[in-house]
Amino acid sequence: NQNHSTHDLLCQLKHRVNMTMLKSSDLPDSARNWSQYLPNKDIHEVVGKLKRCAVVSSAGSMKGSRLGQEIDSHDAVIRFNAAPTKGFETDVGSKTTFRLINSQVVTRREHHFLVDPIFKDGILVLWDPGQYNADTYQWYKKPEFNFFEPYRKYRMANLEQPFYIMKPQTLWQLWDIIQENSPELIHPNPVSSGSLGIMLMMNICDEVNVYEFLPSSRRTDLCYYYKRYFDTACTYGGYHPLIYEKNIIKKLNQGTVDNIYKNGKVTLPGIGDLQC
Ligand code: NCC
């Protein structure tokens, strides 16, 4: 029975994917020089309970969507990495409540993380992929990108802006559930920022509208709405198990197929109050 399995899947996501953020006390004392800047306050406490939230994928198919107003009508909006709003407001809106960034954004020169105004809006959440099954200590000894120093520097200069780091286990907890719900074996590469952002919003909001994660009829090889770069892997996955991530989201959609086709829009329920 379809409803039963959807409810089951939501309960799995609620109970097995830990969306509480990293705290200084999760790390050894030797990490103090940067871990002391981790927020003490739980992210849920900082944002409170939100009703309607929007997740804006960076896909090329956002271009020409004219979804900006609809996106901004939400109580909170999450965007990814260096995706801009300036100059693209008609299609992607201008509100940024959360920005989820991977550790490359913080460490690679080209992003000018410390100075680019793009990052100054909203609550920042950073993630860095550790090895599957690595505990926090192992991850801290061997992160994928060494973000500790840029994190410390950014925090020192912008202490009033909340800036969280995801626990390294969170993405693999989600990966496990994606694997269990997929018909074939998936290579254990990290899930994309998109899926992590959707999960975060489902934990915080009552309703989550996701735009152009499942591509609409505007689907295109253009990777981003903000950059001239063509690669189908951006939409269907190469490194990230994107196609499997997207299949799960499709399963959970409470909106219509027509809305996916026209707006790339999927409506997901919040799981904070879900009874399991
Ligand atoms: O591409 P990226 O993500 O920044 O996109 C954010 C999220 O939007 C969804 N997306 C994007 C493009 C597209 N055509 N379809 C989509 O559905 C995905 O869910 C994606 O996660 C990442 O996941 O962090 C990623 O980051 C980039 C890159 O590191 C950052 O943009 C910073 O430059 C990765 N690209 C590379 O490393 C070259 C990308 O693989 C995933």
Image (cartoon, helix red, strand yellow):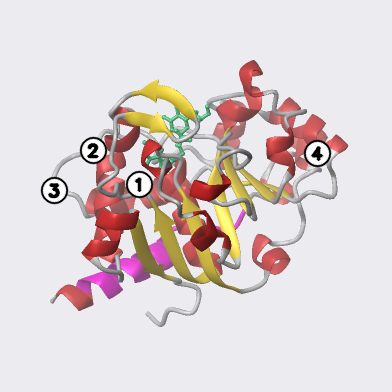
Cα distance between the residues tagged 1 and 3:
14 Å
Q: Dot 1 surroundings within 10 Å: few (below 14), some, or many (20 or more)?
A: many
Find disc 3 in the rendering and name its residue. Answer: 183
Find disc 1 in the rendering and name its residue. Answer: 175
Residue that lies at the very extreme toward the top in this rendered image: 109
| Number of on-image labels | 4
Find disc 4 in the rendering and name its residue. Answer: 155
Q: Dot 4 surroundings within 10 Å: few (below 14), some, or many (20 or more)?
A: some
Report the image quarter containing ligand 1: top left
Dot 1 and dot 2 residues touching (CB under 8 Å): yes
Does 95 sit above or below residue 87?
Answer: below
SS at circle 3 = loop
At 40% from the left and 51% from the top, the residue drawn is: 173
Q: Quadrant of the N terminus?
A: bottom left
For marks 1 and 3, the one nearer the N-term is 1
Residue 40 % position (x, y)? 77, 56
Q: Nearer the viewer, residue 211 or 92?
A: 92
For marks 4 and 3, the one nearer the N-term is 4
Q: Nearer the viewer, mark 1 or mark 4?
A: 4
Cα distance between the residues tagged 4 and 2:
36 Å
SS at circle 4 = helix
